[in-house]
Amino acid sequence: MNEVTPRSQGSSTRLDSYVDRYAARTQGMTASEIRALFAVASRPEVVSLAGGMPNISGLPLDVVGRAIGDLIAEQGPTAMQYGSGQGVPELREQICEVMKLEGISAHADDVTVTVGSQQAVDLVTRIFCDPGDVVICEAPSYVGALGVFKAYQAEVVHAEMDKDGLVPDALRQAIAATRAAGKRIKFLYTIPNFHNPAGVTLSAARRPEILEICREADILVLEDNPYGLLGFDQEPIPALRASEAEGVIYLGSFSKTFAPGFRVGWALAPHAVREKLVLAQESATLCPPQFSQMAISAYLTNHDWLGQIKHFREMYRERRDAMVDALEAYLPKSCQWNVPEGGFYVWLTLPPGIDAKAMLPRAVTARVAYVPGTAFFADGFGSGSIRLSYCYPTPERIREGVRRLAGVLEQEMELRATFGATTPPSLAARSGYDAPSTDIN
Ligand code: PMP
């Protein structure tokens, strides 16, 4: 009989011995405490209002399939080869056409294609941030960007938002307080349109003011705009980059207007920065995926992509309406939420004293999931809020999910009234595997 090697035992001892060898920057790379819970939340009986997955069921798969078949037949050897570190030139030209919709006039030379806009956030942080440098972010902010800033050991300072987006005075105060503490600010990271997770949009009146504050303080603006073309009832809003070319790095993505699986996004940077960005891209990936870029380029050339975006907007508007109607119908009056004019998310403020993270295991037991607000703050705030996404479930499932959530909230409020603060049962600890990262981004 073969001798049984205690493989798991051996490997876990080896794993322990790696702990001391990791680079200091990995200390910021920690799994979210709610991640395990989402393994449970992704079961079909649970209505997940947590994930930010684009609803690609609206895509014409036959058209995409034919375009990819043609690409292989006609340009296979090029499509499957390494390409330029900056990205396919024809696609970069097309990206400039896409950005024109938001008033941006740009040259394809200043566009760097990235592996989703997520990689653009990573590359920009990589070239600007040393450990201890400060990035100013809205409060709350996109969890995936916070993860990048943490991984580069940058410090996040939050600035308040209200229904009109980032509050100019809050930005001024954040800058002044950070500088008074002797810290170096590298950039403002902002999501001006249909914010993830807050759902709000920076008002037209505030846009020049935010730019002026950053110009005066000599702070770069990192404008992250994956949802800009997904407004429900309006023309695309002019980007910050449309009125300020030198002080803004603009990030775009095909993930929400086409499909995230291609992993194609881009950064439009001032010419001087573009150089470093391409070098960083080359060291990270050699080149962004040639095949994906050419597939997207063919799709943009041969398909009515604007018609497709219109279809997505209608689909998401129907879901937004379903969620807002259900919130009105089911939720206690002491809850507050915004009505997003585009994008995927509603930010819900719970009745005073309810802890969103503590309530989550009970919500999952009641077969509804959301993301607690704390995930979107670098400093532990946000426990009284939750992010609800309406992008993925059907309108019926959204209504049912909100109805279940309302039931959990009512119980939670009764529990609080009877016993004071409640302690969460440790549901997360019981599930043994990781959820896909899409559930929490
Ligand atoms: N920025 C924001 C604000 C997002 O919501 C997301 C995806 N959830 C990204 C960037 C990353 O998107 P991708 O890498 O797919 O372009």
Image: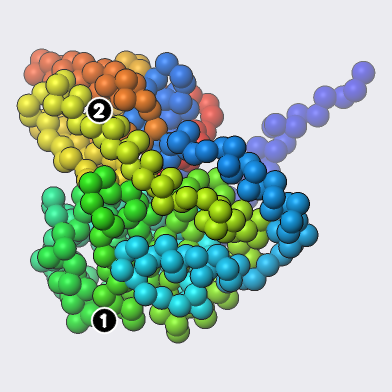
Q: Is mark 2 within 8 Å of ligand 1?
A: no
Residue 64 percent across, percent down from the top left: 59, 44
Label 1: few (<14), some or many (≥20) within 10 Å? few
Residue at image position (65%, 37%) is: 12
Residue at image position (18%, 27%) is: 325
Q: Which residue is mark 2?
A: 322
Q: Which residue is mark 1?
A: 218
Q: Earlier in the sequence, mark 2 or mark 1?
A: 1
264 sits to left or right of 46: right
Helix, strand, or loop for circle 2? helix
Residue 7 percent across, percent down from the top left: 75, 32
Q: Is mark 1 within 8 Å of ligand 1?
A: no
Label 2: few (<14), some or many (≥20) within 10 Å? some
94 sits to left or right of 403: right
Q: Is residue 389 visible?
A: no
Q: Quadrant of residue 271?
A: bottom left
Residue 148 percent across, percent down from the top left: 43, 57
In the rendered image, the quadrant that contains the C terminus is top left
Q: Quadrant of residue 9?
A: top right
| Vertical side of 351 occupied by 185: above or below | below
| Vertical side of 294 occupied by 386: above or below | above
Q: Which kind of residue does numbered mark 1 sit on?
A: Asp
Q: Quadrant of residue 270?
A: bottom left
